[in-house]
Image (cartoon, rainbow, N blue to C red):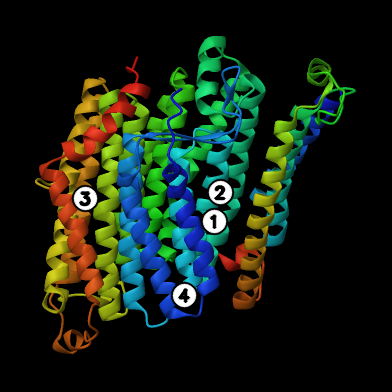
């Protein structure tokens, strides 16, 4: 393995974590908190493009007898684009939060940055145990964003999420321990080589299959797939809207990270790929059906986040290079338009004080710019050209069709149609439905310019990637061809 | 034999923990169940690193590397256990803090009452 290294690879994880520590220390001093958050947030955005591809090994010994003796981080094309998008969305959410509230919490921003650092680490780590540690940190930081709201609902959702996260996390660790006992290593590349050499999959080794099942269980939970879709969507709905945007971004990218590890280690276990595909389809269908039933805008978007996660998981489960490219591309697209939708929802809440459909309507007169931008994001999530959602959904459907999974293609089309119906219903109820003059007059609060800026950037990127998808997909091709396998 | 016994104990701990999380009505008992599951995984890891009549995995002065390799326990699982204990403590502390909050707000720790 090439050992060209840059300290900047480690800095991409270390700088958000350092920011989290500093933000905690600066809590209570508004100016210091803002300065720290802005400067480290901006650094996180710049670093992925300032860093060369390569590996970073956290040990002085390197490889002994061909085996890694320390934790290795791999920085490659797909991790560059994912780390950049994650940092960009975090920065936009920091801007939104710090301009929307008079009193800024350093602790709250610390958890936002901690989540960014932990998620980045899950993308870079070539060490399964290191992945597990940062997955746990990311789950705790996500929960903290929900807890910060302080309502009974957010506490209830957080307890439920943490209890099951505890089980899922320990199951993943048990799976890692099983793999360690079989392969003698925690390094994913070394594990992959040992599994291929020793033929555990062909021999249907029970320990190997157990590790595989436990890893897939953790994958389903961390991603919020069926049957865990309710727990995850409740957590999204329990947080403030900008927090939900960041949480769902972290979830999608952790899902990509763990999905790629599962593909690398367990691709020969066909039944697991079917299981992952069924869980993905379950998330898509149940997510969109639950979204259609909601009478709260924020809750509806939370269920859509789960439904769209199903598309990403479907791409990874199909496992062909084209499907993997489409799946990760959809993850990128989804975090962009869903963040825009959550921010649009927060604008509505700022002005009306609620996200309950029954108490909303005629918002287009008070928020014309937000309405137009959010409509663009709604077209993107519904898969309407020229937005990015159209490109990735089309690629996913073609990949499923090429893999002769025709029923999967049909489900994807149907879920897309239902998503469109749900989004148009929300547009009508929030922005277009006529209301009385008294209700219209209640909308007085101004929307901070940072929200309009963030919305413009996000929807602009949706349009840009819709018109030029190769700007993102070219970063995804190397990993897709490295881990992709033909469906059989 | 000791290794097998630790795996069997770990399996029992895991199942008891899972039962408590799924079946018990009291939130604190659910939290205890979750910690049992963590302990079961830690015990499995300790069992993995165990070597019958083994020595502490520290290369002492004058010891041959081959002798060390033949006798020393496997140190990697021990390091994992330490890290997992730290993670477990953090998660459990957070859940318990939330239990206190929920008790303050609802006056109950019964799942049936809180989620009714």
- Image position, residue A45 (x, y; %): 32, 54
- Image position, residue A317 (x, y; %): 37, 29
Chain letter of mark 4 equals: A
Q: CA distance from mark 3 to mark 4?
A: 32 Å
Q: Quick check: B96 left or right of A241?
A: right
Residue sitting nearer the eye, A404 or A205: A205
Q: Considering only order in the chain, which callout, 2 or 4, is on the residue closer to the N terminus?
A: 4
Q: Considering only order in the chain, which callout, 3 or 2, is on the residue closer to the N terminus?
A: 2
- Image position, residue A98 (x, y; %): 36, 74
Q: Considering only order in the chain, which callout, 3 or 1, is on the residue closer to the N terminus?
A: 1
The residue tagged with tag 2: helix, strand or loop? helix
Contact check, label 2 and label 1, Cβ < 8 Å: yes
* Placement of A307 over or under A110, stated as above or below: above
Q: On the image, numbered disc 4 is attached to which residue?
A: A105
Q: Please identify, in this view, whether the residue under mark 3 or under mark 4 is nearer the observer.
A: 4
Q: On the image, numbered disc 2 is attached to which residue?
A: A136
Instruction: Let me know if residue A295 appears in the view.
Output: no
- On the same chain, marks 2 and 3? The answer is yes
Q: On the image, numbered disc 1 is attached to which residue?
A: A140
Chain letter of mark 3 equals: A
């Amino acid at each position: 393995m090439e050992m060209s290294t840059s300290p900047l690879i480690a800095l991409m994880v270390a700088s958000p974590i350092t920011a989290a520590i500093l933000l905690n220390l600066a809590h209570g001093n508004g100016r210091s908190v803002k300065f720290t958050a802005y400067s480290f947030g901006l650094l996180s955005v710049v670093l992925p493009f300032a860093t060369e591809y390569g590996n970073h090994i956290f040990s002085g010994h390197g490889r002994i007898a061909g085996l890694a003796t320390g934790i290795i981080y791999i920085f490659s094309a797909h991790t560059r684009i994912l780390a950049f998008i994650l940092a960009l969305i975090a920065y936009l959410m920091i801007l939104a939060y710090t301009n929307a509230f008079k009193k800024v919490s350093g602790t709250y921003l610390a958890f936002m940055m901690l989540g960014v650092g932990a998620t980045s680490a899950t993308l870079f780590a070539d060490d399964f145990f290191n992945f597990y540690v940062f997955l746990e940190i990311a789950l705790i930081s996500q929960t903290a964003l929900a807890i910060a709201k302080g309502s009974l609902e957010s506490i209830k959702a957080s307890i439920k999420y943490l209890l099951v996260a505890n089980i899922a996390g320990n199951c993943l660790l048990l799976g890692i321990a099983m793999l360690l006992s079989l392969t003698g290593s925690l390094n994913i590349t070394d594990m992959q080589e040992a599994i291929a050499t020793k033929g555990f999959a062909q021999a249907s080794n029970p320990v190997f299959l157990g590790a595989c099942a436990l890893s897939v269980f953790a994958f389903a939970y961390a991603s919020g797939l069926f049957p865990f879709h309710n727990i995850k969507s409740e957590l999204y709905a329990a947080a403030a809207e900008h927090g939900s945007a960041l949480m769902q971004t972290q979830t999608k990218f952790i899902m990509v990270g763990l999905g790629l590890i599962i593909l690398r280690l367990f691709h020969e276990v066909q039944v697991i790929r079917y299981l992952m595909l069924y869980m993905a389809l379950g998330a898509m269908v149940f997510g969109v059906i639950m979204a259609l039933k909601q009478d709260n805008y924020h809750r509806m978007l939370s269920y859509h986040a789960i439904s769209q996660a199903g598309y990403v998981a479907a791409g990874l489960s199909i496992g062909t290079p084209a499907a993997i490219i489409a799946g990760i591309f959809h993850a990128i697209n989804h975090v962009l338009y869903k963040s825009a939708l959550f921010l649009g929802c927060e604008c509505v809440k700022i002005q009306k004080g609620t996200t309950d459909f029954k108490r909303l309507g005629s918002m287009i007169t008070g928020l014309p710019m937000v309405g137009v931008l959010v409509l663009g994001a709604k077209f993107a999530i519904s898969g309407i050209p020229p937005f990015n959602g159209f490109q990735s959904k089309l690629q996913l459907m073609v990949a499923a069709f090429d893999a002769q999974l025709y029923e999967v293609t049909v489900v994807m089309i149907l879920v897309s149609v239902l998503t469109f119906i749900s989004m148009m219903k929300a547009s009508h109820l929030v922005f277009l439905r006529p209301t009385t003059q008294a209700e219209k007059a209640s909308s007085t609060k101004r929307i901070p310019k940072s929200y309009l800026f963030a919305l413009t950037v996000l929807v602009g990127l949706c349009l840009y990637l819709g018109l030029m998808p190769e700007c993102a997909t070219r970063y995804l091709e190397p990993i897709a061809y490295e881990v992709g396998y033909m469906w059989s | 034999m000791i290794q097998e016994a630790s795996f069997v104990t770990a399996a029992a701990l895991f199942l008891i923990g899972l039962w408590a999380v799924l079946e018990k009505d009291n939130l604190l008992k659910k939290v205890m169940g979750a910690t049992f599951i963590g302990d079961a995984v830690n015990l499995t890891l300790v069992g993995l690193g165990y070597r019958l009549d083994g020595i502490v995995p520290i290369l002492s002065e004058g010891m041959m590397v081959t002798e060390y390799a033949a006798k020393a326990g496997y140190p990697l699982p021990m390091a994992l256990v330490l890290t997992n204990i730290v993670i477990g403590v953090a998660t459990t502390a957070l859940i318990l803090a939330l239990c206190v909050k929920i008790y303050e707000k609802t006056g109950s720790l019964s799942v049936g009452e809180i989620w009714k």
